[in-house]
Image (tube, rainbow, N blue to C red):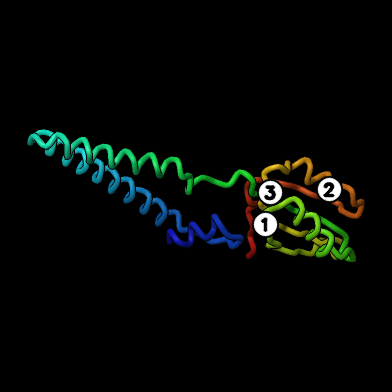
Amino acid sequence: MITQLFNSIYSSAEVKVNPLALTASLVTGLILGIILAIFMATAIGITTGMGFLALGVFFTLLISFFWLLFEKMGFSSVSQTRRYVQIQIPSELDYEVLFEAIFETACRSFELTSVQSVDNKFIELDYVVDLKPDVSDQRLIQRFLRYEKIKNISFSKEAKKRKTL
């Protein structure tokens, strides 16, 4: 289940997560974390109390080092440059070449995740893009607004909830 959860966060696929199973796994992780902290504190206290002060200090510094290392790595942080782009265009417009050129100049990566017909007149395209650090949302929107055929465009940091896959 945890693999499905991480895949749903870092890929374009949507995964249904059972709330009861998610809550159970979070509570289990919390309990195990508390138990581990108690055992580590006990181990450090016993080594210090038995006179192995250097070993207790070493173990404390080792745990602190790894804790700070994991804290600074930021592997669990959310990307600040990831955007979800939704564009509505006329159905006769050849969008692939046009949007690919725009995204290649402004984004590190981009992926077309969904194409949907709207009233048989328009096509709604959903992209997941990772902006380059020097590109702002406003700058990318201005690149799209140069083309009058684009009916609607929206950017968001959070994916929109979908009822279909």
Q: Earlier in the sequence, mark 1 or mark 2?
A: 1
Residue for badge 1: 109
Which is nearer the eye, 8 or 43?
43
Residue at horizontal 25 percent and vertical 41 percent from the top: 37
Up the image or down, 147 lies above or below 93; here it is above
- Give percent across and percent down for residue 154: 76, 47
Residue at horizontal 43 percent and vertical 58 percent from the top: 2
State the separation of the CA atoms marked 1 and 2.
17 Å
160 with respect to 105 (left or right) = left
Tell me the amino acid under the disc marked 2. Answer: Arg
Residue for badge 2: 143
- Looking at the rendered structure, the secondary structure element under dot 3 is strand
Mark 2 residue crowding within 10 angstroms, few (<14) / some (14–19) / many (20+): few
Residue at horizontal 19 percent and vertical 43 percent from the top: 39
Tell me the amino acid under the disc marked 1. Answer: Ser
Up the image or down, 104 lies above or below 53; here it is below
Residue for badge 3: 131
160 with respect to 51 (left or right) = right
Q: Residue furthest right?
A: 148
164 with respect to 4 (left or right) = right
Tell me the amino acid under the disc marked 3. Answer: Leu
Q: Are marks 1 and 2 in contact (CB under 8 Å)?
A: no
Q: Earlier in the sequence, mark 3 or mark 1?
A: 1
State the separation of the CA atoms marked 2 and 3.
13 Å
